Amino acid sequence: GRVDVNCPRVCGHEGAVLDIKWNPFDDCIIASGSDDATVKIWTLPESGLLGTLTDWSADLHGHSRRVGYIEWHTTAANILMSVGFDFKIMIWNVEQAEPITSLDCHQDTIFSVSWGNDGSLIASTSKDKQIRIMDPRTAKIAMKTDGHQSAKASKIAFVTEHEVFTTGFSRISDRQYALWDIRKAGTPLVIEDLDSSSGILLPYYDPDTKVIYLAGKGDGNIRYFEVESGSVQFLNTYQSSLPQRGLGKYLF
């Protein structure tokens, strides 16, 4: 149903909020990235938010342009990655409110990032059509290869220790997905055209079932695929008469 217009809010950014993520290690902590080039950490009361929250627990400054994406570390508590439109990736210790490292590996807009399953690597896609695998400990590129051929937005997600799944567009703007072995630069293990729609496909991977879900804003369907042993198998499609306006992962 409708949300009450007077419901409690979390307020403090001086620009639009572009991304939010719950801390997977603490249900009371949220991170937010904004058009104001900052990342803020918010601690919610254990009893729930009863009034508008305006006091943040950490204010992280390091980007010179808006912060488009944030991702919590997959295995280490209080470690957060932020991605700015200054082409920079920063890793933060949010408990100390200090940067750990900065990765200056891109010369163009970063479209998507993903932590590896153990958090030792970071994968990214960029407007320069390159897929990068980076080591945050050395702040260097471990592997780089050509990705989807269109400069339109491409998304990426780690699915196994050595494999990443991407969505993007072909040279003639057909939507595609691909599976890559990060140990081998060059040809993907799998690449398939899906359709000619214009919406960006977002990949959501469930490691327990090895199923990846593809959905896009404006689409009326969600596709399911099983990813296993270097292959991608179509499972099913959920179809709706109404287009999706937004998507999110439910963590439990």
Image (spheres, rainbow, N blue to C red):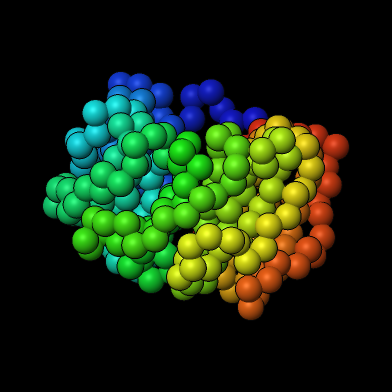
Q: What residue do we see at 73% from left, 59% from top?
A: 224
The quarter holding residue 32 reads top left
- Residue 140 location (% of width, % of height): 26, 56
Q: Residue 153: tell me if it is visible.
A: yes
The quarter holding residue 168 reads top right
- Residue 207 location (% of width, % of height): 56, 70
Q: Nearer the viewer, residue 120 or 70?
A: 120
Q: Nearer the viewer, residue 163 or 150?
A: 150
Considering every residue shown, the one lying at the far bottom of the view is 229
Considering every residue shown, the one lying at the far front of the view is 186
- Residue 6 location (% of width, % of height): 49, 24
* In the rendered image, the vertical position of residue 150 relative to residue 192, given as above or below: above
Image position of 81 (left or right of 172): left
Q: What residue do we see at 56% from left, 43% from top?
A: 154
Q: Residue 13: tell me if it is visible.
A: no
Q: What residue do we see at 48% from left, 30% from top?
A: 7
